[in-house]
Image: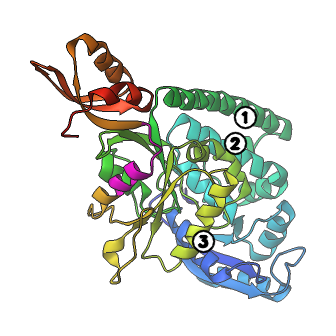
Amino acid sequence: MTENQNEKVPVKTILAALDTGEYDAESSMDELEELAKTANAEVLAQVVQKRPSADSATVLGEGKIDELAELAKDLGAELIVFDTELTASEIRNIEDIVNVRVIDRTMLILDIFAGRAVSNEGKLQVELAQLRYRLPRLMGIGRSMSRLGGGIGTRGPGEKQLETDRRHIQRRIEKLESDLKELEQRRSFSRSRRKKDNVLTAAIVGYTNAGKSTLLNRLTDAGVLAEDKLFATLDLTSRAVELPDGRSVTLIDTVGLIRRLPHHLVEAFRSTLEEAANADIILHVSDISDPEAKEKTLTTEKLLAELGCGEIPVINVLNKCDTVDYNIPEDDTTVCISARTGKGLERLLDLIAKNLPESAKRMKLLIPYDKAGLLAEIRALGKVLSEEYTGDGISADALVDISLIHKAEPYVTSDQ
């Protein structure tokens, strides 16, 4: 949402950052620019200051803030986005000098989330994250909104709550937490039901814009939004796909990750991300053509470890291999693919089948007619792929649940 309420007109924006050497400021600013563009910003310039620590009042030093104010005036900037979290007093102090609305990295990401959440749970999670983040900053942000109107960083339900008092916001937070807890209980019940019904699941995880949704669409025709933008997908999507060994696995697309993912967002979307912790296998998708693929892979691996996914088998899915001109070694847990063209997907499905816990086994059987009840058990817990009634009994090609393998083994045919 821009100041003139026209989504098609980009907001003229300057990006600002303090480089203390704590992280790679240049890479972080490049990512911030991508986030800004996703939120419909026209990035006019980047301002970065190197100094040992932040100025207690304005983050950047006095001279740099004055330079930022002059640049904003010369370029006609409508918004300044800082690549760090700002307090209410910092927002006020900076705005008093630059006379332009100021938001931070987290507010920008929350704005993108607010514009892209589709499901009821996604919208509740976004609103809760907005309110939790904005509550301690009400004085600074409220003043900013009243003085300079709406725009990037003000989208979503949170804007209405900022016009009310803190107690009302706190009550709203408690209501959202209660609603989300109820939804999480339903999700937990669904997970338990899947386990009980022996439904195998594969969580697709990875950095935002790595191609997760494109992969899901290619494998299952899921019709999930797949754009060359950060956070194109926020809501959970799951679709089943059949594996070469006859088993079926449910693929679950999860929200994309980013470097320095704000704590508020990890908490808000933990229920979604926990689908990975409850999966039978994890597909870690990375964009191999990205110069920062290694660093982004480490970001994903770190969060998976925090979620307790250490014991779950992981397949490293190296996407966009059709865009590089060098060979990438593959092994039993690594596959090179192109989700766009379909290259490597057959091998990916083979690896999923190979790395999934053994829950069923494909068997060719000849079952005597007086043991036909076994076929009914196999059908109930597994899958009968084909059957033929012969003079010697029922010839069947079946996916036999692991609990029935010992019963079926006496009837395995010689052409197994």
**Residue 247 left/right relative to 69:** left
- Residue 62 located within the stretch drawn in magenta: no
170 or 208, which lies in front? 208
Q: Secondary structure at mark 2?
A: helix
Q: Is residue 406 above or below residue 274?
A: above
Numbered tag placed on residue 241 in the rendering: none
Residue at the spot x=41%, y=54% of the render? 213
Q: Is residue 244 above or below residue 172?
A: below
Residue under numbered circle 3: 32
In percent of width and height, residue 364 lies at 23, 34
Q: Residue type at mark 1?
A: Glu
Q: Mark 2 and mark 1 in contact (Cβ < 8 Å)? A: yes
> Magenta region: which residues?
348-359
- Residue 352 located within the stretch drawn in magenta: yes
Q: What kind of secondary structure does the magenta stretch mostly adopt?
A: helix
Q: Mark 2 and mark 3 in contact (Cβ < 8 Å)? A: no
- Between the residue at mark 3 and the residue at mark 1, the CA separation in whole angstroms equals 29 Å
In percent of width and height, residue 101 lies at 70, 66
Using the rendered view, name the quadrant where residue 186 is placed: top right
Residue under numbered circle 1: 177
Q: Alpha-carbon neighbours of circle 3 within 10 Å: few (<14), some, or many (≥20)?
A: many
Q: Is residue 159 visible?
A: no
Which residue reaches farthest left?
A: 391
Residue at the spot x=65%, y=46% of the render? 270
Q: Is residue 49 above or below residue 23?
A: below
- Between the residue at mark 1 and the residue at mark 2, the CA separation in whole angstroms equals 7 Å
**Residue 191 left/right relative to 79:** left
Name which of mark 1 and mark 2 comes first in the sequence. Answer: 2
Q: Secondary structure at mark 3?
A: helix
Residue under numbered circle 2: 128
The quadrant of the rendering that contains the N terminus is: bottom right
The quadrant of the rendering that contains the C terminus is: top left
